Amino acid sequence: MRADDLPAPAGPGDPSPPPGLVVVGHFDEGAGYGVNRPQGSDSWLFTWTTGGRGRLSQGGSEARVGAGDLVVLAPGVPHTYTVEPGAAHWRFWWAHCQARPSWTPWLRPYGGEDDGLYAVTPVPAALHERVEGAFRRMYADARWTGEGELPGRSAIVVAHGTAARELALCALEEAVLLTTAGARPPVPPPVPPPGLDDRVRRAQAIVAADPGAPHTVDSLAAQVALSPSRFAHLFAEQVGQSPMRALREARLRHAARLLEGTDLSVARVAAASGFASPFHFTRVFRARYGRPPGAYRDGMRAAITLPKGTPIQ
């Protein structure tokens, strides 16, 4: 399929692009526009709304979207998408492709287990420009020929060649990671006991915000205006473990999330989580989770399936 074969927005009943292609476009459609695919799509559909209002439904799930919402539809499930009734228009980027396996853990918190609709919202406004930039780059990369971009402009472009496809997918991966990491609610900390000292609470928040930072008892104590000895005693008394033990637990939880949701090497996960030595990290991770980091990641990936039990290819 050539870009020239996709000159206009899809209409009701139009099939999705064949699997294996990377197709990206940008539409601004008026009231009444809509697509209905009773058999679903052969590929994943990613939509990023930049203006107006839209509505997407797949199986029994529905998402109403506005600027700054990412909605992803997995293949093989009947779906429709339209300009929201009553809205003047819907402006959005979209991409059809095969999702990389590493994206599924990022999307999983946003639904999709039954119907394959993942609604990533709300994405912080501070990220909107960067996410749209990733889609713009995906469009440009899909036009890459090895020597430059294809001439002319089109609302829709198909990536030709391995380099163009991989570059486009990398740009889309950035958009997926930015939105899912930005929109995901933080893991709630344990409910503090009644009367927890505000300074201890602030120290816990500092650690939770950036577990990989080079925190020490001295640095944490300084940030909550306590002497190191007083801070260590107060923290252990109220939390039931030392500040450094609590920091190690936070770092291990952070490392587990990185293993689940990224393809970073074990050494890079260790460094990003604040462990100076990959060997020490592997030892304490295994003690905490019952298996080494690589086996933990493999186990999480093995559990990832598409709706209706279809494995991701």
Image: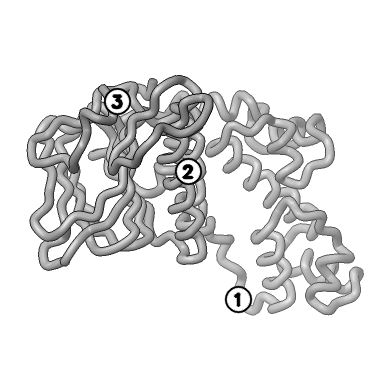
Viewer-closest of 88 and 291: 88
User: Residue 267's x, y, as percent?
Assistant: 74, 32
Quadrant containing the C terminus is top left
Mark 2 is on which residue type? Answer: Arg
Instruction: Find disc 1 in the rendering and name its residue.
Output: 194
The alpha-carbon separation of the residues under discs 3 and 1 comes to: 45 Å
Does the CB distance between marks 2 and 3 fall below 8 Å? no
Comparing marks 3 and 1, which lies closer to the viewer?
3
Secondary element under disc 3, as helix, strand or loop, is helix
Instruction: Find disc 3 in the rendering and name its residue.
Output: 309
User: Reading the chain from its start, which is encountered first: label 2 or label 1?
Assistant: 2
Look at 63% across and 35% down and name the residue there. 289
Look at the picture and state if 64 lies above or below 313.
below
Instruction: Find disc 2 in the rendering and name its residue.
Output: 137
Does the CB distance between marks 3 and 1 fall below 8 Å? no
Viewer-closest of 65 and 308: 65
Look at 73% across and 61% down and name the residue there. 240
Mark 1 is on which residue type? Answer: Pro
Look at the picture and state if 23 lies above or below 178.
above
**Alpha-carbon neighbours of circle 2 within 10 Å: few (<14), some, or many (≥20)?**
some
The alpha-carbon separation of the residues under discs 2 and 1 comes to: 50 Å
Viewer-closest of 273 and 20: 20
